[in-house]
Image (cartoon, helix red, strand yellow):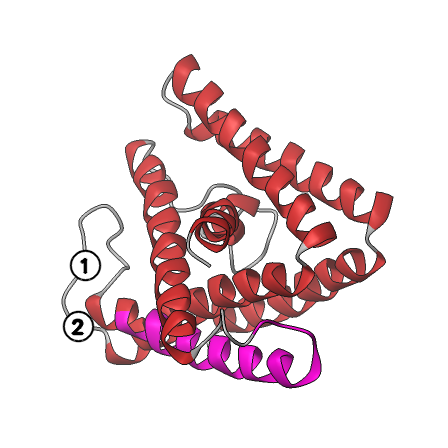
Amino acid sequence: MPENLFKRIVTSFIISSIFLFFLIKGGVYFVFFLLLVYILSILEWIKLSNNRIIFIIGLLFLSLSLTTALILRNNNFLIFILIILISISSDIGGYVFGKIFKGPKLTKISPNKTYTGMFGSYIVSMLIGLIYLNYIKKNFQLNNEIFTLNTSVIFILLISTISQFGDLIVSYFKRLKKLNDTGKILPGHGGILDRIDGMIFAIPGGYLVYILIL
């Protein structure tokens, strides 16, 4: 197993465990976790920002995204988990399919992104999303009339697309600064923004889709 892949797997396990701990504890614990992520993300965003206006826009967007995460955690827990799962599985699908099948590049913004990676993001997120929705519809009070098969597929496709778009946005700013990673705090991943780039777009985007469409 390549050293970088091993680091990525170990780091993913550690940060997932930390996230689950604060997510389950909720309350001030989850607020503390979000504030920590917010501060570390801002420190990385300072390096990526081209000017003061871009920095402020990013600052406000991060505030919106993490505030939405808190609202969803407290009021729509099952939907929050769904959005996180779609975002994570999109990232995993894109990484695995891109590494295995390679293929033509998707965009010059992010040289590592490929069309096969994009399709992998949709395939894995669709699989994980539908399995999760099927589980919570059977075991929790979720409106089956809202999350039909059609609406479930549309919702997952939209969130995966938003998540991939967020990844490209952060990659664009990294490319402008000629950086491979936003930081070095997470071995195998890079910085905090490298890890949550898709999520910070998927969370407010997913919440908006859920409110307006579903």
Residue 157 visible from this viewpoint: yes
SS state under label 2: loop
Q: Residue at x 59, y 31 (%)?
A: 63
Give how far across and how far down residue 176 sits, in percent. Answer: 29, 32
Q: Which residue is mark 2?
A: 103
Where residue 11 sits, quadrant-wise, is: bottom right
Q: What percent of the width, then of the height, locates residue 118?
A: 28, 67
Q: Is residue 190 visible?
A: no
Q: Which residues are magenta?
A: 119-143
Q: Residue at x 78, y 48 (%)?
A: 30
Residue identifier under label 1: 106
Please say whether residue 135 is one of the residues in the magenta stretch.
Answer: yes
Q: Main secondary structure of the magenta part?
A: helix
> Relative to 142, is 198 above or below?
above
> Is 209 rendered above or below residue 45?
below
Residue 71 lies, with reference to residue 64, above or below; the image says: below
**Secondary structure found at label 1:** loop
Please give left or right for residue 61 compared with residue 63 in the image.
left
In the image, what residue occupies the spot 36% across and 39% down?
174
Residue 113 picture location, percent across and down: 27, 60
Q: Is residue 1 magenta?
A: no
